Image: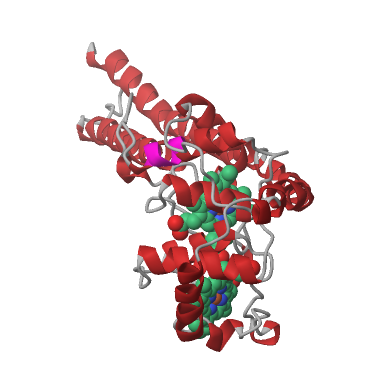
Protein backbone atom coordinates (compact mmCIF):
# COMPACT_ATOMS: atom_id res chain seq x y z
CA UNK A 1 0.00 0.00 0.00
CA UNK A 2 2.82 2.37 0.84
CA UNK A 3 4.50 1.60 -2.45
CA UNK A 4 1.70 2.82 -4.60
CA UNK A 5 1.97 6.58 -4.27
CA UNK A 6 5.71 6.33 -4.72
CA UNK A 7 5.26 4.17 -7.78
CA UNK A 8 2.74 6.39 -9.42
CA UNK A 9 4.96 9.35 -8.58
CA UNK A 10 7.82 7.59 -10.26
CA UNK A 11 5.69 6.75 -13.27
CA UNK A 12 4.48 10.32 -13.52
CA UNK A 13 8.07 11.51 -13.58
CA UNK A 14 9.19 8.96 -16.10
CA UNK A 15 6.21 9.90 -18.23
CA UNK A 16 7.43 13.47 -18.09
CA UNK A 17 11.05 12.63 -18.85
CA UNK A 18 10.39 11.76 -22.50
CA UNK A 19 8.61 15.00 -23.46
CA UNK A 20 11.02 16.89 -21.21
CA UNK A 21 13.96 15.62 -23.18
CA UNK A 22 12.11 16.54 -26.35
CA UNK A 23 11.44 20.08 -25.15
CA UNK A 24 15.08 20.59 -24.22
CA UNK A 25 16.15 19.01 -27.49
CA UNK A 26 13.85 21.22 -29.55
CA UNK A 27 15.10 24.28 -27.68
CA UNK A 28 18.68 23.26 -28.44
CA UNK A 29 17.87 22.72 -32.12
CA UNK A 30 16.14 26.11 -32.23
CA UNK A 31 19.21 27.71 -30.69
CA UNK A 32 21.39 26.04 -33.30
CA UNK A 33 19.04 27.18 -36.01
CA UNK A 34 19.58 30.75 -34.89
CA UNK A 35 23.33 30.49 -35.22
CA UNK A 36 23.50 30.33 -39.05
CA UNK A 37 21.11 33.27 -39.44
CA UNK A 38 23.13 35.38 -37.01
CA UNK A 39 26.17 34.40 -39.03
CA UNK A 40 24.40 35.25 -42.28
CA UNK A 41 24.00 38.84 -41.13
CA UNK A 42 27.71 39.35 -41.46
CA UNK A 43 27.79 37.94 -44.99
CA UNK A 44 26.22 40.90 -46.83
CA UNK A 45 29.03 43.15 -45.61
CA UNK A 46 31.51 41.39 -47.89
CA UNK A 47 29.92 42.07 -51.30
CA UNK A 48 29.46 45.84 -50.69
CA UNK A 49 33.06 45.97 -49.55
CA UNK A 50 33.95 44.11 -52.73
CA UNK A 51 31.92 46.47 -54.86
CA UNK A 52 33.59 49.48 -53.29
CA UNK A 53 37.00 47.84 -53.53
CA UNK A 54 38.28 48.07 -57.09
CA UNK A 55 37.77 51.80 -57.65
CA UNK A 56 39.38 52.52 -54.28
CA UNK A 57 42.44 50.36 -54.87
CA UNK A 58 43.09 51.39 -58.43
CA UNK A 59 44.08 54.99 -57.95
CA UNK A 60 45.35 54.73 -54.36
CA UNK A 61 47.50 51.69 -55.05
CA UNK A 62 48.85 52.90 -58.34
CA UNK A 63 49.86 56.12 -56.61
CA UNK A 64 53.11 54.73 -55.22
CA UNK A 65 53.81 52.85 -58.49
CA UNK A 66 53.10 55.94 -60.56
CA UNK A 67 55.75 57.67 -58.49
CA UNK A 68 57.99 54.71 -59.37
CA UNK A 69 60.00 56.16 -62.28
CA UNK A 70 61.33 58.95 -60.08
CA UNK A 71 62.10 56.39 -57.38
CA UNK A 72 64.96 53.91 -57.69
CA UNK A 73 65.04 52.23 -61.11
CA UNK A 74 65.32 48.44 -60.90
CA UNK A 75 68.80 47.07 -61.38
CA UNK A 76 69.28 46.04 -65.09
CA UNK A 77 70.86 42.72 -64.04
CA UNK A 78 67.77 41.98 -61.94
CA UNK A 79 65.49 42.84 -64.87
CA UNK A 80 67.50 40.58 -67.19
CA UNK A 81 67.30 37.72 -64.71
CA UNK A 82 63.53 38.30 -64.45
CA UNK A 83 63.14 38.32 -68.23
CA UNK A 84 65.01 35.00 -68.54
CA UNK A 85 62.90 33.37 -65.83
CA UNK A 86 59.73 34.76 -67.39
CA UNK A 87 60.57 33.23 -70.78
CA UNK A 88 61.36 29.88 -69.13
CA UNK A 89 58.52 29.60 -66.64
CA UNK A 90 55.65 31.94 -67.49
CA UNK A 91 55.63 32.91 -71.16
CA UNK A 92 54.14 29.67 -72.52
CA UNK A 93 50.90 30.57 -70.76
CA UNK A 94 50.96 34.32 -70.14
CA UNK A 95 52.54 35.14 -73.55
CA UNK A 96 55.53 37.31 -74.40
CA UNK A 97 53.40 40.46 -74.23
CA UNK A 98 51.84 39.42 -70.89
CA UNK A 99 48.34 39.44 -72.34
CA UNK A 100 47.60 35.83 -71.35
CA UNK A 101 45.11 33.65 -73.17
CA UNK A 102 41.73 34.76 -71.88
CA UNK A 103 39.90 32.20 -74.03
CA UNK A 104 41.74 29.45 -72.06
CA UNK A 105 41.28 31.09 -68.67
CA UNK A 106 44.85 32.41 -68.49
CA UNK A 107 44.67 36.03 -67.30
CA UNK A 108 46.69 38.99 -68.51
CA UNK A 109 49.47 40.23 -66.22
CA UNK A 110 49.04 43.86 -67.27
CA UNK A 111 48.82 46.22 -64.28
CA UNK A 112 48.66 43.25 -61.87
CA UNK A 113 51.09 44.93 -59.52
CA UNK A 114 54.05 43.70 -57.49
CA UNK A 115 51.78 42.44 -54.69
CA UNK A 116 49.96 40.10 -57.09
CA UNK A 117 53.08 38.68 -58.79
CA UNK A 118 54.73 38.19 -55.38
CA UNK A 119 51.60 36.56 -53.89
CA UNK A 120 50.90 34.15 -56.76
CA UNK A 121 54.52 32.94 -56.80
CA UNK A 122 55.16 32.91 -53.03
CA UNK A 123 52.06 30.78 -52.34
CA UNK A 124 53.29 28.27 -54.94
CA UNK A 125 50.25 28.89 -57.14
CA UNK A 126 52.45 30.02 -60.03
CA UNK A 127 53.83 28.68 -62.25
CA UNK A 128 50.74 26.57 -62.89
CA UNK A 129 51.41 22.98 -63.90
CA UNK A 130 47.96 21.86 -64.99
CA UNK A 131 45.33 24.40 -65.89
CA UNK A 132 42.82 24.25 -63.07
CA UNK A 133 39.77 26.42 -62.51
CA UNK A 134 41.38 27.67 -59.30
CA UNK A 135 45.16 27.32 -59.06
CA UNK A 136 45.84 25.68 -55.67
CA UNK A 137 48.50 26.58 -53.08
CA UNK A 138 51.41 24.18 -53.56
CA UNK A 139 55.11 23.87 -52.66
CA UNK A 140 57.03 26.88 -54.01
CA UNK A 141 59.20 26.09 -57.06
CA UNK A 142 60.75 29.55 -57.65
CA UNK A 143 63.60 30.82 -55.44
CA UNK A 144 63.19 34.06 -53.47
CA UNK A 145 65.78 35.78 -55.69
CA UNK A 146 64.02 34.66 -58.89
CA UNK A 147 60.70 35.80 -57.46
CA UNK A 148 62.11 39.27 -56.79
CA UNK A 149 63.50 39.33 -60.34
CA UNK A 150 60.14 38.29 -61.82
CA UNK A 151 58.33 40.95 -59.77
CA UNK A 152 60.77 43.60 -61.06
CA UNK A 153 60.51 42.43 -64.68
CA UNK A 154 56.73 42.03 -64.86
CA UNK A 155 55.97 45.33 -63.11
CA UNK A 156 58.47 47.20 -65.28
CA UNK A 157 56.98 45.73 -68.47
CA UNK A 158 53.33 46.14 -67.49
CA UNK A 159 53.16 48.76 -64.71
CA UNK A 160 50.28 49.56 -62.35
CA UNK A 161 48.54 47.69 -59.56
CA UNK A 162 49.19 47.45 -55.83
CA UNK A 163 52.72 47.40 -54.40
CA UNK A 164 53.97 44.84 -51.91
CA UNK A 165 53.02 46.13 -48.44
CA UNK A 166 56.10 47.44 -46.65
CA UNK A 167 54.70 48.20 -43.20
CA UNK A 168 54.87 45.86 -40.19
CA UNK A 169 52.04 43.39 -40.70
CA UNK A 170 52.77 41.15 -37.74
CA UNK A 171 52.35 43.68 -34.93
CA UNK A 172 48.71 44.76 -35.20
CA UNK A 173 45.96 44.83 -32.60
CA UNK A 174 44.60 41.33 -32.01
CA UNK A 175 41.17 42.43 -30.71
CA UNK A 176 40.51 44.86 -33.57
CA UNK A 177 41.87 42.24 -35.98
CA UNK A 178 39.41 39.67 -34.66
CA UNK A 179 36.48 42.05 -35.13
CA UNK A 180 37.60 43.00 -38.63
CA UNK A 181 38.18 39.35 -39.51
CA UNK A 182 34.69 38.32 -38.37
CA UNK A 183 33.09 41.18 -40.33
CA UNK A 184 35.11 40.92 -43.56
CA UNK A 185 36.65 37.48 -43.90
CA UNK A 186 34.86 34.84 -41.80
CA UNK A 187 31.90 34.60 -44.19
CA UNK A 188 34.20 32.94 -46.74
CA UNK A 189 37.20 31.62 -44.81
CA UNK A 190 35.27 30.43 -41.73
CA UNK A 191 35.39 31.62 -38.14
CA UNK A 192 38.70 29.87 -37.50
CA UNK A 193 40.25 30.33 -40.95
CA UNK A 194 39.89 26.68 -41.93
CA UNK A 195 38.44 27.65 -45.33
CA UNK A 196 35.08 26.78 -46.86
CA UNK A 197 33.37 25.92 -50.13
CA UNK A 198 31.90 28.76 -52.20
CA UNK A 199 29.33 28.54 -54.99
CA UNK A 200 30.11 26.88 -58.38
CA UNK A 201 32.87 24.59 -57.14
CA UNK A 202 35.10 27.46 -55.97
CA UNK A 203 36.50 27.45 -52.45
CA UNK A 204 38.03 29.88 -50.01
CA UNK A 205 41.25 28.16 -48.91
CA UNK A 206 42.46 27.60 -45.37
CA UNK A 207 44.48 30.55 -44.06
CA UNK A 208 46.68 28.44 -41.81
CA UNK A 209 49.70 28.49 -44.13
CA UNK A 210 49.44 32.15 -45.14
CA UNK A 211 52.19 34.43 -43.82
CA UNK A 212 51.31 37.94 -42.60
CA UNK A 213 52.66 39.35 -45.89
CA UNK A 214 50.55 36.94 -47.94
CA UNK A 215 47.47 38.01 -45.96
CA UNK A 216 48.28 41.68 -46.62
CA UNK A 217 48.83 41.03 -50.32
CA UNK A 218 45.67 38.90 -50.71
CA UNK A 219 43.56 41.64 -49.08
CA UNK A 220 44.86 44.27 -51.53
CA UNK A 221 44.82 42.17 -54.73
CA UNK A 222 41.64 40.09 -54.18
CA UNK A 223 42.77 36.90 -55.96
CA UNK A 224 40.19 34.83 -57.84
CA UNK A 225 36.77 35.06 -56.20
CA UNK A 226 38.05 37.08 -53.26
CA UNK A 227 37.01 40.75 -53.21
CA UNK A 228 39.65 43.50 -53.32
CA UNK A 229 39.77 45.44 -50.04
CA UNK A 230 41.06 48.89 -50.91
CA UNK A 231 42.20 51.65 -48.53
CA UNK A 232 38.57 52.80 -48.25
CA UNK A 233 37.58 49.41 -46.83
CA UNK A 234 40.60 48.59 -44.69
CA UNK A 235 43.37 51.03 -43.78
CA UNK A 236 46.97 49.80 -43.66
CA UNK A 237 46.70 49.59 -39.85
CA UNK A 238 43.52 47.53 -40.16
CA UNK A 239 45.21 45.18 -42.63
CA UNK A 240 48.00 44.73 -40.06
CA UNK A 241 45.36 44.00 -37.39
CA UNK A 242 43.72 41.34 -39.59
CA UNK A 243 47.09 39.78 -40.53
CA UNK A 244 47.98 39.60 -36.83
CA UNK A 245 44.68 37.91 -36.08
CA UNK A 246 45.13 35.39 -38.94
CA UNK A 247 48.59 34.57 -37.54
CA UNK A 248 46.94 34.04 -34.14
CA UNK A 249 44.45 31.63 -35.74
CA UNK A 250 47.38 29.38 -36.69
CA UNK A 251 47.79 28.57 -32.98
CA UNK A 252 44.71 29.77 -31.08
CA UNK A 253 44.59 29.45 -27.29
CA UNK A 254 41.38 27.69 -26.34
CA UNK A 255 40.37 29.97 -23.52
CA UNK A 256 37.22 28.80 -21.80
CA UNK A 257 36.57 25.68 -23.81
CA UNK A 258 37.73 22.65 -25.68
CA UNK A 259 39.14 23.31 -29.15
CA UNK A 260 37.24 20.37 -30.69
CA UNK A 261 39.60 20.35 -33.64
CA UNK A 262 38.75 23.97 -34.59
CA UNK A 263 36.04 22.84 -36.95
CA UNK A 264 33.93 25.93 -36.29
CA UNK A 265 31.39 27.49 -33.95
CA UNK A 266 28.68 24.90 -34.68
CA UNK A 267 30.87 22.08 -33.42
CA UNK A 268 30.62 22.90 -29.73
CA UNK A 269 26.86 23.33 -29.86
CA UNK A 270 26.53 20.16 -31.87
CA UNK A 271 28.71 18.15 -29.52
CA UNK A 272 26.70 19.53 -26.59
CA UNK A 273 23.44 18.60 -28.31
CA UNK A 274 24.66 15.13 -29.20
CA UNK A 275 25.91 14.22 -25.73
CA UNK A 276 23.04 16.05 -24.01
CA UNK A 277 20.34 14.29 -26.03
CA UNK A 278 21.96 10.87 -25.81
CA UNK A 279 22.34 11.38 -22.05
CA UNK A 280 18.73 12.45 -21.59
CA UNK A 281 17.38 9.59 -23.68
CA UNK A 282 19.53 7.25 -21.60
CA UNK A 283 18.19 8.62 -18.32
CA UNK A 284 14.60 8.54 -19.60
CA UNK A 285 14.84 4.95 -20.76
CA UNK A 286 16.57 3.93 -17.51
CA UNK A 287 13.78 5.49 -15.46
CA UNK A 288 11.13 3.89 -17.69
CA UNK A 289 12.91 0.54 -17.46
CA UNK A 290 13.05 0.77 -13.66
CA UNK A 291 9.34 1.42 -13.36
CA UNK A 292 8.60 -1.51 -15.73
CA UNK A 293 10.62 -3.80 -13.44
CA UNK A 294 8.53 -2.93 -10.45
CA UNK A 295 5.47 -5.09 -9.79
CA UNK A 296 2.36 -3.98 -11.64
CA UNK A 297 -0.46 -2.52 -9.63
CA UNK A 298 -2.56 -5.16 -8.06
CA UNK A 299 -5.77 -5.70 -9.98
CA UNK A 300 -7.72 -5.53 -6.74
CA UNK A 301 -6.36 -2.12 -5.77
C1 LIG B 1 50.44 26.41 -67.30
C2 LIG B 1 50.08 27.81 -67.51
C3 LIG B 1 50.67 28.87 -66.59
C4 LIG B 1 51.99 29.12 -66.31
C5 LIG B 1 53.21 28.35 -66.82
C6 LIG B 1 52.01 30.26 -65.46
N1 LIG B 1 50.73 30.71 -65.22
FE1 LIG B 1 50.21 32.31 -64.10
N2 LIG B 1 48.24 31.85 -64.35
C7 LIG B 1 47.77 30.77 -65.07
C8 LIG B 1 46.35 30.64 -64.85
C9 LIG B 1 45.45 29.59 -65.45
C10 LIG B 1 46.00 31.67 -63.95
C11 LIG B 1 44.62 31.92 -63.30
C12 LIG B 1 44.62 31.08 -62.03
C13 LIG B 1 43.40 31.25 -61.16
O1 LIG B 1 42.56 32.10 -61.47
O2 LIG B 1 43.31 30.54 -60.14
C14 LIG B 1 47.21 32.43 -63.69
C15 LIG B 1 47.25 33.56 -62.89
C16 LIG B 1 48.40 34.30 -62.66
C17 LIG B 1 48.43 35.57 -61.97
C18 LIG B 1 47.21 36.35 -61.48
C19 LIG B 1 46.75 37.18 -62.64
C20 LIG B 1 45.44 37.90 -62.42
O3 LIG B 1 45.34 39.06 -62.85
O4 LIG B 1 44.52 37.31 -61.87
C21 LIG B 1 49.74 35.96 -61.92
C22 LIG B 1 50.28 37.24 -61.31
C23 LIG B 1 50.51 34.93 -62.57
N3 LIG B 1 49.66 33.94 -63.01
C24 LIG B 1 51.89 34.96 -62.70
C25 LIG B 1 52.61 33.94 -63.27
C26 LIG B 1 54.05 33.91 -63.28
C27 LIG B 1 54.94 34.99 -62.71
C28 LIG B 1 54.42 32.75 -63.91
C29 LIG B 1 55.80 32.24 -64.13
C30 LIG B 1 56.62 32.06 -62.95
C31 LIG B 1 53.20 32.06 -64.28
N4 LIG B 1 52.15 32.79 -63.88
C32 LIG B 1 53.16 30.86 -64.95
C33 LIG B 1 48.52 29.94 -65.89
C34 LIG B 1 49.89 29.87 -65.88
C1 LIG C 1 33.90 36.35 -51.02
C2 LIG C 1 34.73 35.42 -50.32
C3 LIG C 1 36.01 35.92 -49.66
C4 LIG C 1 36.16 36.90 -48.71
C5 LIG C 1 35.09 37.80 -48.11
C6 LIG C 1 37.56 36.90 -48.35
N1 LIG C 1 38.24 35.96 -49.08
FE1 LIG C 1 40.21 35.50 -48.93
N2 LIG C 1 40.04 34.19 -50.46
C7 LIG C 1 38.87 33.88 -51.12
C8 LIG C 1 39.17 32.98 -52.23
C9 LIG C 1 38.16 32.42 -53.21
C10 LIG C 1 40.56 32.76 -52.21
C11 LIG C 1 41.38 31.90 -53.18
C12 LIG C 1 41.63 32.68 -54.45
C13 LIG C 1 42.25 31.81 -55.53
O1 LIG C 1 43.08 30.97 -55.22
O2 LIG C 1 41.89 32.00 -56.70
C14 LIG C 1 41.08 33.50 -51.06
C15 LIG C 1 42.41 33.48 -50.67
C16 LIG C 1 42.90 34.10 -49.53
C17 LIG C 1 44.23 33.96 -49.02
C18 LIG C 1 45.30 33.03 -49.54
C19 LIG C 1 45.40 31.83 -48.61
C20 LIG C 1 46.53 30.89 -48.96
O3 LIG C 1 47.59 31.05 -48.41
O4 LIG C 1 46.34 30.03 -49.81
C21 LIG C 1 44.34 34.79 -47.94
C22 LIG C 1 45.55 34.97 -47.05
C23 LIG C 1 43.04 35.43 -47.76
N3 LIG C 1 42.19 34.99 -48.75
C24 LIG C 1 42.75 36.34 -46.77
C25 LIG C 1 41.52 36.98 -46.63
C26 LIG C 1 41.25 37.98 -45.63
C27 LIG C 1 42.25 38.45 -44.58
C28 LIG C 1 39.96 38.39 -45.82
C29 LIG C 1 39.21 39.48 -45.07
C30 LIG C 1 39.82 40.78 -45.02
C31 LIG C 1 39.41 37.62 -46.92
N4 LIG C 1 40.39 36.78 -47.39
C32 LIG C 1 38.12 37.74 -47.40
C33 LIG C 1 37.61 34.34 -50.80
C34 LIG C 1 37.33 35.34 -49.89
Q: Is residue 166 visible?
A: yes
The spot of residue 291 in percent (x, y) is 26, 30
Above or below, 75 relative to 106: above
Q: Nearer the viewer, residue 224 or 145?
A: 145
Viewed as shown, does residue 232 lie left or right of 6? right
Q: Residue at x 28, y 32 (%)?
A: 283
Q: In the picture, which quadrant includes the N terminus?
A: top left
Give the total of numbered labels: 0
Above or below, 241 relative to 209: above
Q: Is residue 133 visible?
A: no
Q: Nearer the viewer, residue 278 or 235?
A: 235
Q: Residue at x 34, y 33 (%)?
A: 280
The spot of residue 188 in percent (x, y) is 57, 51
The spot of residue 204 in percent (x, y) is 53, 58
Q: Quadrant of residue 39?
A: top right
Viewed as shown, does residue 232 lie left or right of 177? right
Q: Quadrant of residue 17?
A: top left
| Secondary structure that dominates the magenta span | helix
Q: Quadrant of ligand 2?
A: bottom right
| Residues drawn in magenta | 244-249
Q: How is the image coloured?
A: secondary structure
Q: In the picture, which quadrant includes the C terminus?
A: top left
Q: Nearer the viewer, residue 265 or 289?
A: 265
1 in magenta: no
The spot of residue 271 in percent (x, y) is 36, 40
245 in magenta: yes
Q: Residue at x 37, y 53 (%)?
A: 209
Q: Residue furthest top?
A: 2
Amino acid sequence: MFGRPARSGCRAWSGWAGPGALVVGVAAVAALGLAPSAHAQTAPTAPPAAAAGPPATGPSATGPSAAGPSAAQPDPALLERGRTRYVEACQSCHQADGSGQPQSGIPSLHADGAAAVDWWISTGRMPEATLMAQAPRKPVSISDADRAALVAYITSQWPGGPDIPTFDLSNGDLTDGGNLYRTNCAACHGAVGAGAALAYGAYAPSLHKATALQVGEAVRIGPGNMPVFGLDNLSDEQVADVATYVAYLHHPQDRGGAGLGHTGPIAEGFVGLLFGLVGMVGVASWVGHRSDDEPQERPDA
